[in-house]
Amino acid sequence: MEYRGKKKSHFKFCDMWIEDEKWRGQACTAGIFLKSITNPLKRLNNDRFSGTHNICDIAKQELNVIQKQLMLDPINIQLQEQEQVPKQGYQDALSASLNLKKQQSKLDWTTMSDQSTSFFFARVKQRISQLQICRLQDERGIVWEGRKYHFMKNC
C-alpha cells in the first residue's frame, strides 16, 4: 500500500518577519528551538505577510486619496493629521514588500549562479579536451597516439 499524501515542504525563514512586533526573541541555533518556532512563524506569515504586494497597492491607493484631498486644501490641519496613519501603513507595507522581493531575488540569483557556474566549468572542460593533442607524427613518419607519450628529446 502506497501513501500519496502531501509532499512535506521545507521551512524557509523570511527576513521580513523580524520587523514584526511579535518577533522579539533572540535567534538560537538549537534545532529544538527552531522546530518550536516554525509553526508560529508560519501563522505569522499567513496572518500578516500573505499578499504583501497587494497590501502595498491598497495602502498606496488610500494614501493617494488623502493626498489628493490635501492638494485641494493644503492648509487643512485635519487632513495633514489623517495623512500620517496611511503614510506609515504604506511605508511598512512597502518595506515588507521590498524585503520579500530582495529575499526572492537573492534565492533566484543563488540558484541561477549555481547553474551558470556548472555550465561555465563544463564549457572549460570541453574546450580543454578540444585543445589537447592526441596524435603526433615525428620527422621519421612515426605516428604517436594517446596520452601515454610525452615530448622527449632524441626518441
Image (cartoon, rainbow, N blue to C red):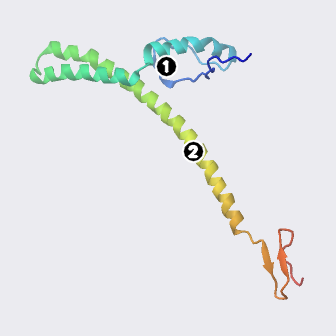
Quadrant (top left/top right/bottom left/bottom right) for the N terminus: top right
Specify the label residue 151 is tagged with.
none
**For marks 1 and 2 on the same chain, the one whose residue lies earlier in the sequence:** 1
Image height of 146 relative to 95, above or below: below
**Residue furthest to the front:** 1
Residue 41 falls in image quadrant: top right
For mark 1, what is the residue? 17
The foreground one among 66 and 81 is 66
SS state under label 2: helix
Q: Residue 47 location in percent, x, y?
A: 45, 12
Q: Which amino acid type is shown beneath numbered disc 2?
A: Ser
For mark 2, what is the residue? 113
Per the model, the C-alpha gap separating discs 1 and 2 is 26 Å
- Residue 24 is at least partly visible in this image: no
SS state under label 1: helix
* Neighbour tally class for label 1: few under 14, some 14-19, many 20 plus, Cα within 10 Å: some
